[in-house]
Amino acid sequence: MKQLMLGNAAAARGLYEAGVAVVSSYPGTPSTEITEELAKYDEVYSEWAPNEKVAMEVAFGASLAGKRSFCGMKHVGLNVAADPLFTVSYTGVNGGMVIAVADDAGMHSSQNEQDSRHYARSAKLPMLEPADSAEALAFAKQAYEISETFDCPVLLKMCTRIAHSQSVVETGERVEPQAKPYEKNIAKYVMTPANAIRRHPHVDERMEKLAAFAETSALNRVEEGTDHATGIITSSTSYQYVKEVCGDRFPILKLGMVWPLPEQKIRDFAASVTTLTVVEELDGFIETYVRELGIPCGGKAFFPQLGEFSQNLVAEKIGLPVHKGTALDETIPPRPPAMCAGCPHRGMFYTLSRNKCTVLGDIGCYTLGAAAPLNAIEMTLCMGASVSSIHGYNKALGTQSEHKTVAVIGDSTFMHSGMTGLANIAYNQSNSTVIILDNSITGMTGHQQNPTTGYNIKGDPAGKIDLEALCHAMGFRRVRVVDPYDLDACDQAVREELAADEPSVIISRRPCALLKYVKHKAPLRVDPDKCVGCKSCMRIGCPALSFKDGKARVDATLCVGCGVCSQLCKAGAFESTAKEG
Amino acid sequence: METKNIMIVGVGGQGSLLASKLLGHLLLEQGYDVKVSEVHGMSQRGGSVVTYVRYGDKVASPVIDKGEADYIVSFELLEAARWMEYLKPGGQIVTSTQQIDPMPVITGAATYPENLVEKMRTAGAKVDALDCLALAEQAGSVKAVNIVLMGRLSHYFDLPEEAWQKSLEAMVPAKFLELNRKAFALGKNA
C-alpha cells in the first residue's frame, strides 16, 4: 500500500523489513524518529543508550553475536561514537550492522554544521545517502546486504530535509535473516596492535571491492538529459532541488552511495558532458574527489558551504530563472525559540541571572537560557562540556571564579557525558558548583526516556539511576535538591553552594511542563487595578506574559499556573483563575 | 499537473502537524504525488515554524521557496506577514487573526506591527483573515484552530466535501471527531 512516510520512519521500516534485531541509539535531531519508530515493532529489541558511543558498542555487540543491529545518531553524536567507529572498521561485523547519522545543514537544532561524509572516508566505511523516503526504506534494507557481503558496518546518512520530509513509500514484509552463529576469532575481533596491523590490509582491500561495487550498483545512476552542455553530479536533497529546477534537461549522475565513489562512472559521465558541476550541501566532498581525479568541475566556487540549499538557490547558481515573491515592507520582529511557559528551567536561570553568576552551559532546551531577557548562559560547546570546562575555568582562576561560576546541565546530558566531567571535579578537586537541571526527560529532542527517568524506550518501568546517590558516591558531600518553581529556595541554594569551600551539586528538579502526566494549575491572571506596571514579571521572559497599555497581561491559552511570575510581583497583582471552593 | 504548494506557518506548538497530516492524507487519496516537510527540534519551542505541503504528478523538492506558494495557511498574523514573500503572485493567504507576541516584543526590544491584514492586501496579497481561535472555542476546544483553518482552506479547493471528511476521520482520534467536524464546518462557512 502506498503511504506517506517521514524519511526517518521509512528508514526504520527498511531496517525492520531487513530483520534488525537489536537497536541502541541516543536521541538527537534530526535522527530521533528512526529509533522511536523501531521501538514500535515488537520483533525488535530497542533502547535509548546513555550516549552514542555506548549505543554503537551495543550494536557492535549484537552484530558480534550474529544479529542484525542498528544505532542512530545525529552528526555530532558520531563524534562521540567515533572511537568504536574507526575500529569496528577493522574488526568488521558478524551480523549486519547499520549506523544512521543525520546531518543538520542550516543548524535547525544543532551546535555546528559538520559534514558527516568525511567520517566515511576517514574511517574507511561505505556510506549510503537516500534522497527521499522511498530510498531511505530501500537503502536501509540494502545496507544490511552490503554490511554482510563486505564485512563492515554501513553508514546511512540522513539530513534534516530527508529525515523530516514525508514522501510516498510502499512497504514490504519483514524477512528474518539467516542466523550467523558467533564464532571465536581472536585475530578478527581482538584489536591488539599485532592483530590490528593484520586487519588493516583487509580494510583497504574491502574498500577496493566496495569501489568496484559502486561502479555497477544501481545505487549510483545516470539520468539522461537533453542538453549535454552541463552535467550535474549530486545526491540527497540537493538532487531533488536539481530535479525541481532542471527537470530532464541536464544529465545527472545521482549518487546513492557517497563513499567509496565510482571513479570510472564519474570519468565516463564527465566525458559525456561539456562542463561538470557538483551540487552538494555543506563541504565540497564529492567535488574534492572529482578534482583529485584530475577532472575540472564547478561546485563550491559558486555554491555555498553553509546552510541548506533550495530550488531557488540551485536555479540561481546554475543560471536558470528564480521565483520571486513580494516581501512586506515592514519590520517583522523575529520569533526565536524560547523556553515554554511553565518551563522548570526558567526559575533557576532567573536566579543565576539575578546573582550575576557566570554560567557555563550545555546542550538541551536549557541552552535557551542564553536568550534574552535572561541572557544567563555564557558558554555552550558540546554534550557534557559544562561540567568539564567549569573545572578548567576554576583551576585557571581559582577563588576569582569559584564563588560566582556554575555549570548547568540537563539530566539526560549529564548521563550522556556529564558524569565523567563530574568525576574529574571529584578526583582533581576544584571548588566547582554544578547544577543538574533535572526535568526528568530528554526534552529538546521530543521527550525520550533516559537512565534517570525510571522508564525505558517503550515507556515501561526500567532501572533508575539515583542522581543524589551517584554524586555522593563520587565523593561530593554537598548535594542538594531544589524546586525551580520556588525562587527563594533557588536563591538560597545557589548562594550557599557558591559560598562553600568545596565542590557541590545542586539538583534543580521538576518535570518538563510539556510532559503528559504533569498536572497544571489554572492559569493566572493580572488584576489591572493592582498591577503598577513595574515590569518585574517581564524579566523572566515567559511567553505567556505580555505588556499592553502599561499593564502586564497573561495569555490564558499558554499559562500553566507555575507561579514564578507572581513571586516577582511586589504588588500582588497575579491571581489564580481557578474557581474558589 | 504542475506541482502545487501549500505552506502552513505559525508558532511552535500551535498544531500545524495535524493540519499537514490531514492535507497529506487528502491529497494522496486524490492520487497525487505528495511531499510534506516539517521542522522538529529547537525551533519548535515557541519559535516561528513552517511546514511545506507539495502535490502534483511528480514532486521533487520537499520545500517551497520564495514566490512559489499557492496558499499560505497561517495560525498567527505576524507569521503570515513574515512568510508573505513565499506567496506566488496571485496566491492566497488564509490566516487566523490571533496575535502572539514573540520574545523580542515581550522584552520590549521590538513592537508588534499594526494593521497587518491591510498591509498585506496593499502589498498585493489576497488575504482571508478570520478569528479562528473564537471559532475553535465555539467548536469546543481552542486546540481545534488547525481544523478551523483547514475548513477555511477547503473553500479554495475543488474537492468534494466527503473527501475532506474522510481524511478528517482518518487523521483525528474518534473521540474528538465530532468536535473537529464542527470546527471544520465553522471555518468553512465563516
Image (tube, rainbow, N blue to C red):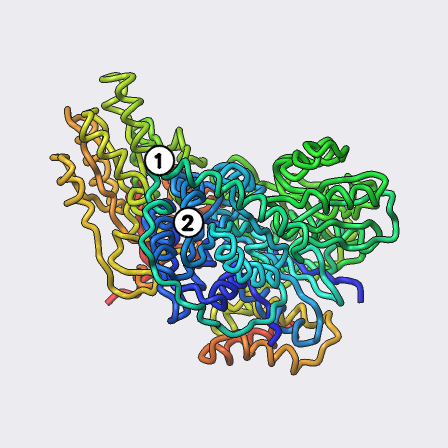
> Which type of secondary structure does the marked residue at label 2 adopt?
loop
Residue B35 in sight from this viewpoint: yes
Is B151 left, or right, of A42 in this rendering?
A: right
Q: Decide which of A411, B128 is in the foreground and name it.
A: A411
- Circle 2 crowding by C-alpha within 10 Å: few under 14, some 14–19, many from 20: many
Above or below, comparing residue A486 to residue B149 in the picture: above
On the image, which quarter does residue B6 sit in? bottom right
Is A199 left, or right, of A315 in this rendering?
A: left
* Residue wearing tag 2: A444
Name the residue located 23 percent from the left edge and 35 percent from the top edge.
A491
Q: Chain of mark 1?
A: A
Above or below, comparing residue B89 to residue A486 in the picture: below
* View extreme (bottom): residue: B162
**From mark 1 to mark 2, how far is it between C-alphas?**
44 Å
Name the residue located 42 percent from the left edge and 39 percent from the top edge.
A198
Comes first in the chain, label 1 or label 2: 1
Report x, y in % for residue B182. 55, 78
Q: Quadrant of the C terminus of chain B?
A: bottom right
**Amino acid bearing label 1:** Ala
Is A160 left, or right, of A58 in this rendering?
A: right
Q: Decide which of A112, B8 is in the foreground and name it.
A: A112
* Of the two numbered discs 1 and 2 in the rendering, the one whose residue sits closer to the viewer: 1
- Circle 1 crowding by C-alpha within 10 Å: few under 14, some 14–19, many from 20: few
Name the residue located 43 percent from the left edge and 68 percent from the top edge.
A178
* Residue wearing tag 1: A194
Q: Decide which of A338, A316 is in the foreground and name it.
A: A316
Badge 1 vs badge 2, beta-carbon distance below 8 Å: no
